Image (tube, rainbow, N blue to C red):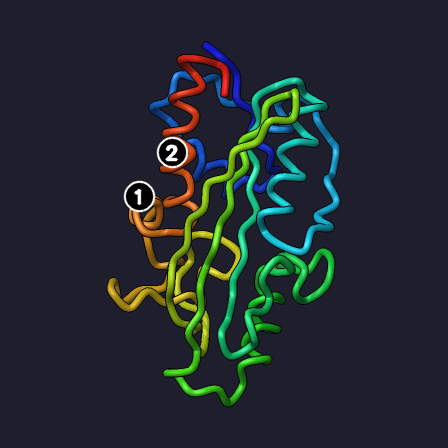
Amino acid sequence: MPELLLGTNNKAKVLEYRSLLEDLPYYLFTLAERGITTVVDEAGNSLEENARLKAVTLSAESQLLTLADDSGLEVDALGGEPGPLSARYAGEGASDEVRIGFLLSRLDGVPWEKRTAMFRCIIAIATPDGKVELCAGECPGFITFEPRGAQGFGYDPVFYLPQLDKTMAELSLDEKNRVSHRGQAARKAYAVLKRLAVSLSW
């Protein structure tokens, strides 16, 4: 079977992708499993730029078909922040708990009806010769006043889904994959990867 590199060191994200892509005819490898220590500087101004940059860089280095993504939380009351800076919103190396605390402090005094937000994910699939295909997903919701739930990662504990009456962190992995921005983008990526497994050409 062909090989696919998952371009992330986030263990929770790797778990999600292994679940989402498990039926594909690929051997899935992580960066750690291939001994890749390169850290790609996410210097782009958009999720699309960052996902493309990571996938192309890691595919060129590994010489493997590579999947990488960039995800972001866009909060309407904050003018779309943190967006592409979601992982670094409270500073480099900040924990999820610190990032959530910082986000909630920025929304202090904002009423429920104005706490609308969107999770967005862009997946880039790159070949070693630099060809790229992008897949997008998005999930609307609200930012809660305090964290709820112990599943997931990132801003999941404060991202509320009205249709389920739960935060993203209160969902099982299967539930999350059905509704999340990453799940939506991954289903599109699944179709691309299935096509590539047959033809290995664009």
Q: Residue at x 42, y 43 (%)?
A: 185
Q: Residue at x 42, y 49 (%)?
A: 137
How many numbered dots are placed on residues in this image?
Answer: 2
| SS class, disc 1 | helix
Q: Residue at x 51, y 46 (%)?
A: 122
Chain-order first, disc 1 or disc 2:
2
Up/down of 188 relative to 109, above or below? above
Q: Residues within 10 Å of mark 1 (few under 14, many from 20)?
A: few
Looking at the rendered structure, the kind of residue marked 2 is Ser
Q: Tell me residue 162's x, y (percent).
A: 28, 68
Judge left or right: residue 149 versus residue 87: left
Q: Residues within 10 Å of mark 2 (few under 14, many from 20)?
A: some
* Residue at image mark 1: 174
For the residue pair 186 and 12, the one nearer the viewer reads as 186
* Residue at image mark 2: 19
Up/down of 104 relative to 164, above or below? below
**Image quarter for residue 59?**
top right
In the current view of this chain or complex, which residue is farthest to the bottom?
109
Judge left or right: residue 149 versus residue 107: left
In the current view of this chain or complex, which residue is farthest to the front?
202
| SS class, disc 2 | helix
Judge left or right: residue 181 versus residue 35: left
Q: Tell me residue 1's x, y (percent).
A: 45, 9
Looking at the rendered structure, the kind of residue marked 1 is Asp
For the residue pair 20 and 116, the one nearer the viewer reads as 116
In the current view of this chain or complex, which residue is farthest to the top?
1
Q: Disc 1, disc 2: CB below 8 Å?
A: yes
Q: Tell me residue 200's x, y (percent).
A: 49, 14
